[in-house]
Amino acid sequence: MRTGGIRQILRGLALVFPLACALAQQSEPPPDPPPAQSTTSAEPNPENSAAQPAPSTPWWNQQPKRILGIMPNYRAVSSGTVPEPPTPKQAFKIATENSFDYSAFAFTALTSAVSFGTDRHPQLGEGVEGYAGYYWRGFLDKTDGNYLVIFALPTVFHEDERFYAKGTGPFWKRAIYAASRVLITPDYRGHDTANLSELLGRGIAQGASAFYYPSQDHRLGPLAQEYGFALGRDALTDVFLEFWPDIAHIFRRHHP
């Protein structure tokens, strides 16, 4: 099969796979609403805060551990929930779960297929060998970024990199709030502060990529473009997490 044919197949898979997952999830019978949560807890567990929202939060507005049963959502905290600051061990666990969850390998395959199909880095070559070059680099990008942004730098700066959903209010206020989390995050005392973990972490990860991407991508312009893309992607991800419970409630009428 010619390389052009391989690219078309990979592009098609990148478009069809998420839709198929959504349809498969919608076909499942609605689960029973979860039992009411106790208002007190002897041992708060921040890493499970997505599954233990405040009692005042409607069940349909809770952040699930997985979106569509596939996408890991361990960083999101349901609106109204105020967990204890994460310990370094808990932050490390979240970074590891996000990096090595089974879905991480699948989504890296899809994003690598898109980059390969659009010939984003021509120097990586064609065919199976070229695609493999995109894949391991994409996986390394995701992994080192996760450990820097979720674990290493938050531990140094005492910042909480979990996403705290707003859950209520006008659409535009919630959207601006969610997108701004790449710039603002709570510290261990719950006070908003500059999100140095995100800003520096993505920058360091982008600088490190110069060691394993082709030489033509080492210039300041391409690196700055990739850095901006990484911040924009994280901002859009937070916006998606903010509104996902609303979307799931509208279209499926059961717990997301």
Image (tube, helix red, strand yellow):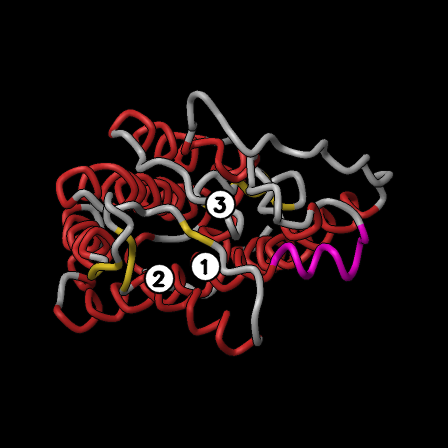
Q: Provide residue 90's location: percent of width, then percent of height.
A: 33, 28
Task: Residue at 39% x, 59% y: name it.
Answer: 234
Q: Secondary structure at mark 2?
A: helix
Q: Secondary structure at mark 3?
A: loop
Residue 238 - label: 1
**Residue 64 drawn in magenta:** no
The answer to whether 229 is drawn above or below residue 40 in the figure is below
Label 2 or label 3, whichever lies nearer to me, is: 3
Q: Quadrant of residue 181?
A: bottom left
Task: Residue at 69% x, 45% y: name it.
Answer: 59
Residue 93 - label: none
Residue 181 - label: 2
Residue type at mark 2: give it.
Answer: Arg
Residue type at mark 3: give it.
Answer: Thr
Q: Secondary structure at mark 1?
A: helix
Q: Earlier in the sequence, mark 1 or mark 2?
A: 2
How much space separates mark 1 and mark 2, taking CA atoms? Answer: 7 Å
Callout 1–callout 2 Cβ contact below 8 Å: yes
Q: Which residue is mark 3?
A: 81
Task: Residue at 40% x, 64% y: name it.
Answer: 235
Count neighbours of disc 2 (C-alpha within 10 A) and say few if under 14, some if 14 to 19, many if 20 or more: many
Q: Residues in magenta?
A: 244-253
How much space separates mark 3 and mark 1, taking CA atoms? Answer: 17 Å
The answer to whether 229 is drawn above or below residue 161 in the figure is below
Residue type at mark 1: give it.
Answer: Asp
Q: Provide residue 121's location: percent of width, then percent of height.
A: 32, 60
Which residue is nearer to you in this view: 132 or 139?
Answer: 139
Count neighbours of disc 1 (C-alpha within 10 A) and say few if under 14, some if 14 to 19, many if 20 or more: many
Q: Provide residue 233's location: percent of width, then percent of height.
A: 40, 62
